[in-house]
Image: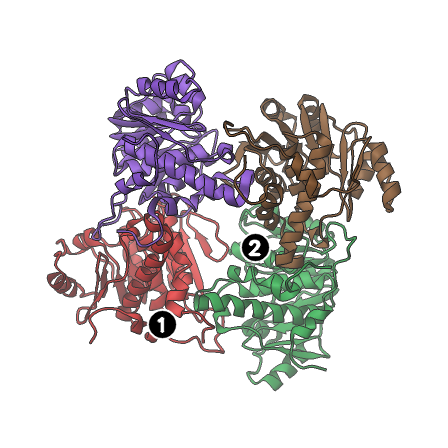
Chain colours: A brown, B purple, C red, D green
Amino acid sequence: AEVCTGPGDLALLPARAPGAHKGAGGEVLVVGGGPYQGAPYIAAMGALRAGADIVRIASPAYIPMPDLIYERLEGDVITNDHLETILGLVGRADVVVCGMGLGRASHDVVLAVAEAAEKAVFDADALARPLPAAKETIYTPHAGEFARMTGAEPPVDLVPRARSVKAAATAGTILLKGPVDVVSDGKRVRFNRTGTPAMTTGGTGDLLAGMAGALFCHLPAFEAACIAAYANGRAGMRAAEERGCGMLATDMLDFIPRELFGRGTPG
Amino acid sequence: AEVCTGPGDLALLPARAPGAHKGAGGEVLVVGGGPYQGAPYIAAMGALRAGADIVRIASPAYIPMPDLIYERLEGDVITNDHLETILGLVGRADVVVCGMGLGRASHDVVLAVAEAAEKAVFDADALARPLPAAKETIYTPHAGEFARMTGAEPPVDLVPRARSVKAAATAGTILLKGPVDVVSDGKRVRFNRTGTPAMTTGGTGDLLAGMAGALFCHLPAFEAACIAAYANGRAGMRAAEERGCGMLATDMLDFIPRELFGRGTPG
Amino acid sequence: AEVCTGPGDLALLPARAPGAHKGAGGEVLVVGGGPYQGAPYIAAMGALRAGADIVRIASPAYIPMPDLIYERLEGDVITNDHLETILGLVGRADVVVCGMGLGRASHDVVLAVAEAAEKAVFDADALARPLPAAKETIYTPHAGEFARMTGAEPPVDLVPRARSVKAAATAGTILLKGPVDVVSDGKRVRFNRTGTPAMTTGGTGDLLAGMAGALFCHLPAFEAACIAAYANGRAGMRAAEERGCGMLATDMLDFIPRELFGRGTPG
Amino acid sequence: AEVCTGPGDLALLPARAPGAHKGAGGEVLVVGGGPYQGAPYIAAMGALRAGADIVRIASPAYIPMPDLIYERLEGDVITNDHLETILGLVGRADVVVCGMGLGRASHDVVLAVAEAAEKAVFDADALARPLPAAKETIYTPHAGEFARMTGAEPPVDLVPRARSVKAAATAGTILLKGPVDVVSDGKRVRFNRTGTPAMTTGGTGDLLAGMAGALFCHLPAFEAACIAAYANGRAGMRAAEERGCGMLATDMLDFIPRELFGRGTPG
């Protein structure tokens, strides 16, 4: 099997059926925000640009964007008071993307979301112990979050790093972000070498989690994580061609569809 | 007569008179929003891009857009308390576009709007029984909403589907959205084959309703519905050429004017 | 003298001095908004695009735009309670642009602004009796507002129409908008034939008033009004080339600088 | 040594390391806003476009922009009540950019920020006496602010002007903005001749301060100030090519990355 992600992975993307109805591209729920406002919106826009048809954001923070559906959560931070509302939304979503901009005080809610969700992507503040796990799960830690999840920093060298990610991937697929991304579902391991140092700017990880969520609507966790990492890195490279280290995460949004769907009518 | 919509339909669009004054392109009132914020704004922008000159939104939800006129309705959802305000606006509009993002708790208001309006487009949550009917009406259901309107799912095969739409179109023109759209005023039937599976993304139907509202200012209901369906599908195809399944409903806004008005000065 | 506006009028625009300091392009204060939110913002953006350096908006309505300075007026409508705040701002502005989106209940404030201002552009709801007049004034009525100002509809034929505008221009320069604009300062008369029927869309008049305000910082009232009318119409023609009757007033913003300043570095 | 800034200065910009982690581009905190809303946001966007990875805004004013992190300060103006929150953020930032849109009533807070900060850029209202000074400081006055800082207007002729800036630069590097910018750290002096008279529009100075803050994360104060002045002026010239005196400060944002990082992948 190939060890690195590449354009061939995109062949796994299912064509949209000609008779598809509204929402066929998948429904994603983003649960996040509180101390940070923009993170869940960047994730949500990433999900739309990666093909999700309906994206809802349950968050205390509101940024008006007409293509997104905002589910208001009162207050400054997500608490158990919002749980009933959130769980109602979890039941309607194909995939829940959870954790960005959340802060560290909402972990009980994260665990309850995990218990209720069929498929979930956990990122950022959701990557804490006890580790949340849905029926099928993708985790998208950077090195520090990986250490928080597992208790140990990942090795720097790729071979032991891969072994470490593989060993940790017991509850789902782990996408360990880094100069080279490592993806494992506990059995398989893939490296992703797309990306650019300019992607150290804030929000690129939120975007990746949202993309993974959209792809996870139609693909298994491991394949969704590999393709998300590949296309996210490619979009970053494209944005950096234009703007170098002055690129923003939102600059990447424009490049995601072409990387994933090429140019030309879908279906 | 031709059975399918096509570019020839656009010849029906009236040229803007050289001496036209402000508002000559038509005034549209959008009544919607509550549980969903973005839907009435997408409809309203669709109306502007389809040639309406003045577009007002009566909604509890506010998204700041300088080209639209916002009529604030207090609270989270539209209720009878807003009726006087809304009816005052209905009296000034050429066409009312009603239902998107409304939720199911405002049907009394929808019925009152229908009673007061000369021309109306009903979409989404407004498509419930008892069915609202203005003096002249366009209904824009998808299959599920058609079932809610009529009590029966529309047949899948086009010939019986057309018969079913024609039979249901007693109170106005019905535009049944689907892989092939079916338009009937109870006498005539037209099919529309423009569109792309990428249009399953949220908001494309709101856009269509807004466009139908703008065209309905100057055209009979059946013709307005046919042209709206045709141009909406064309704009979706154009947006999908650029962005595939990662396209958004708001991406389509840029393509609507060229589909409807071509390139070059109007009038 | 030439009877029609034309590109030659642009030669009157003063070059920006190389050693100019912040604000040398002029400071404009827009007073408007209340029942309508977007109108003063379209005027303000028009002023910036026509060369003003600092543009403040005193309004109850807030639309976040980082290049504008918002001066909050509490409540839903401008009243005498805001007068002290507004007059403080009038004292700092080169030109006040007043009336768009104001509603009819704030005329006392309009009259007080007129009394305090050196130079003012009055538009829309400010065009009511008693007519406000600053030391130097531009009025920008359409036909209906002209009738409200003067008590009589303007004649349709251009020659008597020009005579009518000239006779009415006792307190300042009048720019009567229409298929052909008529500008008079009571002595001279100019016609402006730029524009397109697509400009019947909402907001194009707000834009014109803002542009006139910016130009009035550096030019006499008559010349500012002529150039604003000419460049506004040209920008509308350019926007309509792209979008026909689906153009928006805000589409015109991008075309204003090139019409006024050409392409190439200023100064 | 060269007397004028030039493209050669850009060689000082450090390449982003291939293994860089999130935030490696630098974290900037903007403290500003109150009477003016947009100024700190323009500074913050300037910082992002000049390569900062994480930009926080502590401000009473909120403009939703998903790439920025907003730290809410209650009320209309920054006071000592916000000090604990602000100082917590100062501790996490590589550079603090302070003063834009602040008004004159918050100088106690400015002084406390200066005392706590390792590196700071002071602009606009922060340029008052007693003069704030961090461990390392850049001051970005225009002529009037320079007079407020030092008690004397700067001479107009460049040679005595340079002498005056050099003499004043005891607590840090001064970037005196003007038709020709003068930068001095008390020992060295550099002139910057990029720029255009169209940059008299509001916000161009805010942008410059934000850019200086981003560059100051990785460069000494004098070098950061020189490069910021050079690239800001170049971006203004590029924006003015397109829009002349109708350019906005935010138009410049798009041109900053190319001026600083050229075209092509970084690192």
How crowded is the residue under tag 1: few (<14 C-alpha within 10 Å), some, or many (20+)?
some
Q: Quadrant of the C terminus of chain D?
A: bottom right
Residue at 47% in and 34% down = B203
Which amino acid lies under the numbered mark 2 shown in the image of this protein? Tyr
How crowded is the residue under tag 2: few (<14 C-alpha within 10 Å), some, or many (20+)?
many
Q: Position of residue B145 (x, y in %)?
A: 42, 21
Query: Which of the two residues, A11 or C36, is positioned nearer the viewer here?
Result: A11
CA distance separating discs 2 and 1: 30 Å
Query: Which of the two residues, D243 or A233, is positioned nearer the viewer here?
Result: A233
Query: Which of the two residues, B111 or C35, is positioned nearer the viewer here?
Result: B111
Q: Quadrant of the N terminus of chain D?
A: bottom right
Please tell me in which quadrant of the rendered image residue D255 appears: bottom right
Residue most extreme to the top: B151
Numbered marks: total: 2
Which amino acid lies under the numbered mark 1 shown in the image of this protein? His
Q: Secondary structure at mark 1?
A: loop
B148 horizontally vs A103: left or right: left
Q: Chain of mark 2?
A: D
Q: Is residue B76 above or below residue D153?
A: above
Q: Is residue A259 visible?
A: yes
Mark drawn on residue C154: none
A140 horizontally vs A247: left or right: right
Q: Secondary structure at mark 2?
A: helix
Mark drawn on residue D41: 2
Q: Which residue is mark 1?
A: C218
